[in-house]
Image (cartoon, rainbow, N blue to C red):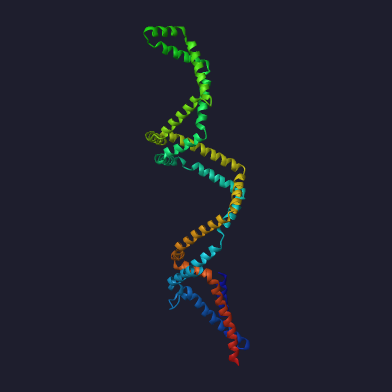
Amino acid sequence: MKSRNLATTSLAVMAIGFLITLFLPDNLGVILLRGGFEAGLVGGIADWFAVTALFRHPLGLPIPHTSLLLKNRDKIIQSLISAMENELLNKESIEKKLGKIRIVSIGSSLLTRLFSRRKARTEMLEQLGSIVQRLPLEQAIPYVQAAAADYIRHADLDTAADQIVTKLMNDGKDIAALDYALEGVSAWSERPETKAMLGKIASEKLAEVKLGGLKGMAFQAFVGFMDADMLGEMLQGMLKSGIRDFQQEDSLYREEIIREIRVAIFKLINDEERIASVKEWAEAELRGEAATAFLQTQIGHVRSKLISLLEEERATGGRRLFRLYAMLVRRISLEQQWIQGWEERIRGSLLAFVEANHYRIGLLVKENLDMMDDDSLVNMLEDKVGKDLQWIRVNGALCGFVVGLVLTVVQLF
């Protein structure tokens, strides 16, 4: 420490000067210097003793009222803790400082600086890709299945189905479904293979009919006259004619079949046993191996797609990420009430944290000081305040020298 060397040098200069003046012939100048050096030596020694006594025993001698720092170590530590808790970092000052900080604005500025750097964006995307790659999404499958099964178990499906069916019927979807089915059947009935199939079925079934008497003879004559091709053509024509009748909006048969379809649907959705069986089936399917395999496959697809998108974005330097962030910031900046609300919530959380943990400041100071032995504590304090204390020794020697000169002059007079 330069100041300590300077203080020691000043004391040595006073001692050497005093010794030299003892062997010089007496004259006015020597007498004045001897008085100055003598007083400077006394002042320097006194200040050295005082400064040294703060930290250790001077010359290692257990002189009373010396090594004051170590003797009062506990008091000093408690004073430091009290000063930290009650003056330097008291709760009121912390709360007042937090009240002046615009937390959301500061956070937004830091994020903007971060997102404006291409390197930061690419590193962020790389980290996100690594996180997505390692994220154990498969472990969430049992929870997803359990949640879906529990929802199905407690869901009011009959009410939901009634509302859905009513909405579909009000929108005419049942009629549209009937028309779609009729168009499909009409297209099927016009195929040549359909005619052949109908003729074959009719021929086989007519051959199985057993009638006696005149009716039997007439029926057998009819069957013998009609071959499979003729029967198929006749049935095909009847089927196509019937479908055309059903497709006519003013057809009585159409209205009747629509009414029957609606009645059947409402009976179905109001059948509690059937609804319960549907729930049991759905719950079993959701917990089954097929559902598990399906979810695992979908999770793999989603993970691969997400990683691919992150890689593409990283290759472009994260431009879309920055545009998305800028869009969000502009949108949020318009919601001043929302920002103010978050400011209050964050500030309230920080104040609650300070309130609950303020005592830890003193504990932290005490723990750190208790970890230091006596020599380390003394060296730390000497390093922090020793420079100014060593200047006290220098000033003591210089002031003593000046005072010695003045006193010698007074003695001469």
Of residues 131 and 278, the one drawn nearer to the viewer in this rendering: 278
**In the rendered view, does 16 fall on the left or right side of 363?**
right
Percent across and percent down for residue 296 are 46, 36
Q: Can I make out residue 163 in this image?
A: yes
Percent across and percent down for residue 399 are 58, 81
- Total tally of numbered discs in the picture: 0
Q: Quadrant of the N terminus?
A: bottom right
Percent across and percent down for residue 388 are 55, 73
Report the residue at 46% width, 13% height from top. 200
Of residues 194 and 392, the one drawn nearer to the viewer in this rendering: 194
| Residue projecting furthest to the bottom | 413
Report the residue at 49% width, 18% height from top. 239
Percent across and percent down for residue 398 are 58, 80
Of residues 335 and 225, the one drawn nearer to the viewer in this rendering: 225
Instruction: Report which quarter residue 290 is drawn in.
Output: top left
**In the rendered view, does 413 fall on the left or right side of 197?**
right
Q: Quadrant of the C terminus?
A: bottom right
Asked if residue 413 is positioned above or below residue 288 in the image, the reply reads below
Q: Can I make out residue 20 in this image?
A: no
Asked if residue 170 is positioned above or below residue 5 in the image, the reply reads above
Of residues 20 and 409, the one drawn nearer to the viewer in this rendering: 409
